[in-house]
Image: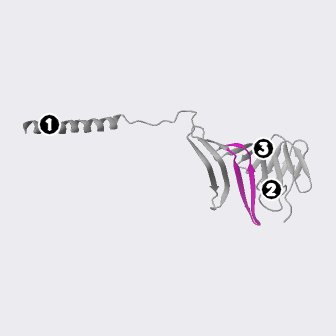
Amino acid sequence: MNVTKRSILIAFALTVVCGLLYLYTNTFFKTKIVIQEGLPTFIAYDSTVSTYGKNGKVEKSLTSTKLTYFNDNNMYFFENPLITSYTYTDKGIDVWHIKGHRGSMLLNEYATISEDVVLTPGFENAPVQKATADSLKYDFHTNKITSPTTVSIFGQAFSTEGTNFSFDLNSNVLEYKGKPNAIFYPKKK
């Protein structure tokens, strides 16, 4: 019986020592998970991101099959992106869709869409039916889409292409400042 009491006392003492050792190591040697530079912070599949204005209405939405985010430079990279821009007017809502195979975005600054880019309206009386390009840049602050490369524009009874493309989503005015020089205004409603 003496041996059993001594064994229980030793087991209890060792348990207390182990518990104190555990608390000591957790207090002073906490492990930190550090994402190495160059590795993505997260990757999401089949995702949709929306931004809302001060009035509570959606202003932009982005859907992609794969989204990769890098926290160190605040950059997003997309596969098969579709950006939808919503502009609210007195007469209704103007919706424009930009899609391509690849894209990148600096949060709250701009998005660049590349590889077989198509710009299409989602409303009637648009100045064009479709515009295609190798790449387009969408500036979120000015709400303008630009491209220094060749952009092809298709309307109801015409098609044309030119360089130095600029499209103001607020007024739906589309223009080339290269060759040829052209400006397309929205149809009167």
Quarter of the image that includes the C terminus: bottom right
The spot of residue 143 in percent (x, y) is 73, 51
Percent x, y of residue 4: 11, 38
Mark 1 touching mark 3, by CB under 8 A? no
Q: Amino acid at mark 1?
A: Ser
Q: Which residue is mark 3?
A: 116
Count of numbered marks: 3
**Quick one: label 1 or label 2, which is nearer the N terminus?**
1
Q: What distance separates the C-alpha of mark 2 from that of mark 3? A: 22 Å
Q: CA distance from mark 1 to mark 3?
A: 77 Å
Q: Is residue 32 toward the left or the right of residue 160 in the image?
A: left
Magenta-tinted stretch: 79-104
- Which residue is labeled 2 in the image? 172
* Sequence-earlier tag: 2 or 3: 3
User: What residue sits 48% from the left and 35% below the top?
Assistant: 34
Which callout, 1 or 3, points to the residue nearer the camera?
Answer: 1
What residue type is disc 3 on?
Answer: Asp
Which residue in the structure is indicated by mark 1? 7
Residue at screen point 82% across, 58% down: 126
Query: Sequence order check: which comes first, mark 1 or mark 3?
Result: 1
